[in-house]
Image: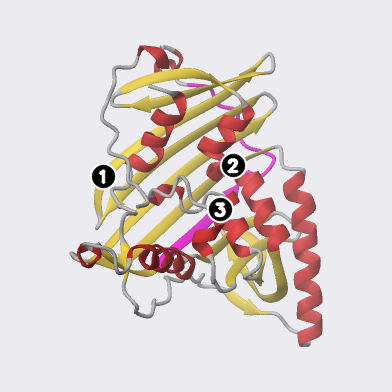
Amino acid sequence: MSLRKIATLLLIGVMVISFAACSKKEETSAGKSEKSAIVTPIDGTSEQKAAKGVELLEAAKIKIAQLKSYNADMGLYFEFVNNDGKKSADVKTSIKSLSDPFLKHIAIESTSDGQPIGNSQFYVEEENDEKTIFMFFQDEWYKSPVDDETLFSLLGQYDIQNITSVFLVASSNAVAAEEEEIDGVKTTKVEAIINADLLPKTLVSTGVFVASGMTTLTEDYLKGVDAMDIDYWIDDDGNIIRYTFNAGEAYQKISDNLYSKVEGTEGYEDAQKLIVNSYSIDVKMKNINSAEKFEISQEALNAKAIEDMEPVEDGLPTQE
């Protein structure tokens, strides 16, 4: 089995959501929101708040480019309605990242309607300018050499430094809205948007929908999408402590566009109907440039070569 195939199995196998679904023509509802107990509105005129927002986003762009190490937690919260009724699926990912030496650990846990459905783990290390990926699959560890292009295609959505930079560059209309303390860190919440002309490329290049089975998504599926709100919480040094967005409307648009491709064809009435209520991403960062060093587990170091894996049925979701 190829490296790309097994890694794809690991990444989307933890979520049993078939993207063969299409959609009903109904309104989506708003996603979940989270509020801290201590929130203080920013004083000043609209112009001053906008200037402050732009200043903070520019500082964040510099800081994210200089990032050397971090720990991050990424949450995906998916709520939808299909032919079987209301459903939910959550994916919680823990990420440790060091740059000197290069070492990453990614642990993914998923639930469906509140019940555990799977987990996976990855390590990536670099020695002598060559990278190796370690993957936990079907109770066994496997390893394989990996080049940068393949690594990005497989785990790029968990490269917090890269995807955060992409979101920052695409963001505009920034406004400093309020001050909020997160895990003891004073932050300023900056509300921004990603305009419709930039959103398709942004969502595809950051791999936002990979966890739900969209491994070959193209910008064409996002044709007609509207702008998307995105909120950042930035500390006084310009470090991003948290950011959130709800891509549910974009997901709905993808489903609508898929439905339009099959509508009127034989048997299309039997297609799975999908109403997306929320597809929210919540990223929290800590130990910025001060993350503790860690080592690859002994079990992973004893991994088998990926070429020694027995063939398995993938059961991957398809788009059509």
Q: Which residue is mark 3?
A: 204
Q: Residue at x 23, y 62 (%)?
A: 266
| Image-based side of 45 in relation to 145, left or right | right
| Image-based side of 77 in relation to 194, left or right | left
Which residues are the magenta region?
278-296
Q: For numbered disc 2, what is the local secondary structure?
A: loop
| Residue 50 highlighted magenta (yes or no) | no
Q: Which residue is mark 2?
A: 159
Position above or below: 74 against 313: below
Q: Amino acid at mark 3?
A: Val
Label 1 or label 2, whichever comes before in sequence order:
1
Label 1 or label 3, whichever comes before in sequence order:
1
Viewer-nearest of discs 1 and 3: 3
Q: Where is the N terminus found, in terms of image quarters?
A: top left
Q: Position of residue 154 (x, y in %)?
A: 51, 36
How busy is the neighbourhood of tag 1: few (under 14 within 10 Å), some, or many (20 plus)? some
Q: For numbered disc 1, what is the local secondary structure?
A: strand
Q: Is residue 105 visible?
A: yes
Quadrant of the rendered image containing residue 310: top left
Q: Position of residue 275 (x, y in %)?
A: 33, 70
Q: Residue at x 50, y 48 (%)?
A: 73
Specify the farthest residue to the bottom: 45
Q: Are marks 1 and 3 in contact (CB under 8 Å)?
A: no
| Image-based side of 18 in relation to 221, left or right | left
